């Protein structure tokens, strides 16, 4: 073998090994991001405790209403022919209900975690509330975390379910973290007229941007080749890509009122995502509220009064539009 042929052969081997290594690392990254454990039913107890840590007495409130038959469970068959679960509860004074809220949880959580929002809407705003488990979470089926992208279609189905229960003509979808990304992604879809407003709390601008940030924070790595390879794995395995799962692209199609909330001390979904998202919505009414000193998904706990009053005022405005 000539020296030139040997160099070419060695280069080919190195490239092959590099590609193989990238594929293996990409597969690991995809599994790390989309297949965390424990999850689902196995993770219920942790999340019940988390609900109480965010607002004391939440699970007692939940269990009490459920024991009285006021708070109920329901299931549907979702977009991927999977069984999906949600809970729903009528307004504190049903005869004077002000509308319906869909509350969407975040990554690795389930319908229990954001009971503070369910209680805010039901007990303080007198709204009917439906709060689902997204795929791979809580009591819902699923083979991976959708990161909001396919979840947007499931939440669209849940808006229809809620409307069939209460027949309201004013509905707001309110999500936190991944639930906020789900909300923004949903906002760009064709929706029935009764879906009138959205509240997003610390959502990311796209799955690519969020995983890029996490990769840098947790592993001190650039997006290429790990994230690029993981994106290919996700596309081949699940049929969607990190870049198409974009809040920004969906917001460009949204013309209904939206309130954007973010803590300025958030370094998990970086605070910079707020401006990207806010600027992407070019049609229709929008508001922004920055929770000073709040870390990720902590805006309500950091300033409960401010959070509640900003959401209340936004809803009142949205009803006039």
Image (cartoon, rainbow, N blue to C red):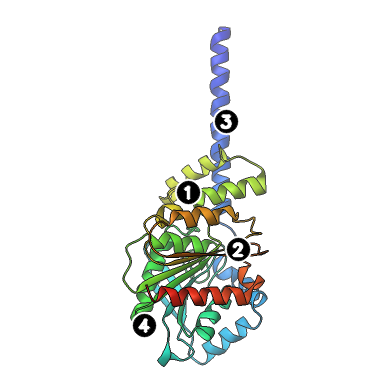
Q: Secondary structure at mark 4?
A: helix
Of the 4 image quadrants, the one containing the C terminus is bottom left
Callout in the foreground (2, 1): 1
* Image coords of residue 38 (percent x, y): 60, 63
In which quarter of the view is residue 226 placed? top right
For label 1, the residue is: 242
For label 4, the residue is: 165
Sequence order check: which comes first, mark 4 or mark 3?
Answer: 3
> How far separated are the C-alphas under marks 4 and 3?
55 Å
Callout in the foreground (4, 3): 4
In which quarter of the view is residue 282 placed? bottom left
> How far separated are the C-alphas under marks 2 and 4?
33 Å
> How far separated are the C-alphas under marks 4 and 1?
35 Å
Q: Secondary structure at mark 3?
A: helix
> How far separated are the C-alphas under marks 1 and 3?
22 Å
Q: Secondary structure at mark 1?
A: loop
For label 2, the residue is: 38
As drawn, the label of residue 290 is none
Of the 4 image quadrants, the one containing the N terminus is top right
> How far separated are the C-alphas under marks 2 and 3?
32 Å
* Image coords of residue 186 (percent x, y): 40, 62
Left-right relation of 263 to 320: right
Tell me the residue at 58%/58% (across/down). 36
Sequence order check: which comes first, mark 2 or mark 1?
Answer: 2
Sequence order check: which comes first, mark 2 or mark 3?
Answer: 3
For label 3, the residue is: 18
Sequence order check: which comes first, mark 1 or mark 3?
Answer: 3
Q: Alpha-carbon neighbours of circle 2 within 10 Å: few (<14), some, or many (≥20)?
A: few
* Image coords of residue 122 (percent x, y): 50, 83
């Amino acid at each position: 073998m000539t020296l030139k042929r040997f160099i070419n052969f060695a280069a080919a081997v190195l490239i092959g090994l590099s590609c193989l290594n990238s594929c293996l690392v990409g597969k690991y990254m995809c599994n790390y991001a989309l297949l965390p454990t424990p999850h689902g039913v196995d993770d219920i107890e942790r999340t019940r405790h988390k609900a109480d840590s965010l607002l004391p007495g939440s699970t007692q409130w939940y269990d009490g209403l459920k024991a009285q038959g006021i708070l109920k469970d329901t299931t549907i068959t979702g977009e991927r022919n999977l069984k999906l679960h949600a809970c729903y509860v009528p307004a504190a004074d049903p005869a004077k209900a002000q509308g319906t809220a869909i509350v969407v949880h975040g990554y690795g959580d389930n319908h229990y975690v954001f009971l503070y929002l369910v209680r805010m809407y039901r007990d303080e705003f007198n709204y009917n509330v439906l709060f689902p488990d997204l795929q791979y979470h809580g009591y819902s089926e699923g083979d991976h975390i959708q990161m909001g992208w396919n979840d947007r279609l499931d939440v669209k189905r849940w808006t229809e379910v809620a409307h069939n229960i209460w027949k309201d003509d004013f509905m707001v979808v309110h999500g936190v973290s991944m639930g906020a990304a789900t909300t923004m992604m949903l906002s760009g879809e064709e929706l029935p007229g009764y879906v009138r407003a959205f509240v997003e709390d610390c959502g990311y601008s796209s799955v690519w941007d969020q995983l890029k940030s996490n990769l840098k924070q947790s592993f001190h790595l650039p997006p290429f080749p790990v994230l690029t390879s993981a994106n290919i794995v996700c596309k081949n395995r699940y049929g969607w890509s990190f870049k198409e799962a974009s809040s920004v692209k969906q917001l460009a199609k949204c013309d209904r009122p939206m309130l954007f909330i973010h803590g300025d001390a958030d370094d998990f979904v970086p605070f910079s995502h707020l401006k990207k998202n806010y600027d992407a919505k070019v049609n229709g009414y929008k508001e922004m509220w920055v929770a000073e000193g709040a870390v990720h998904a902590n805006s309500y706990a950091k300033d409960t009064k401010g959070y509640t009053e900003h959401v209340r005022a936004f809803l009142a405005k949205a009803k006039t539009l």
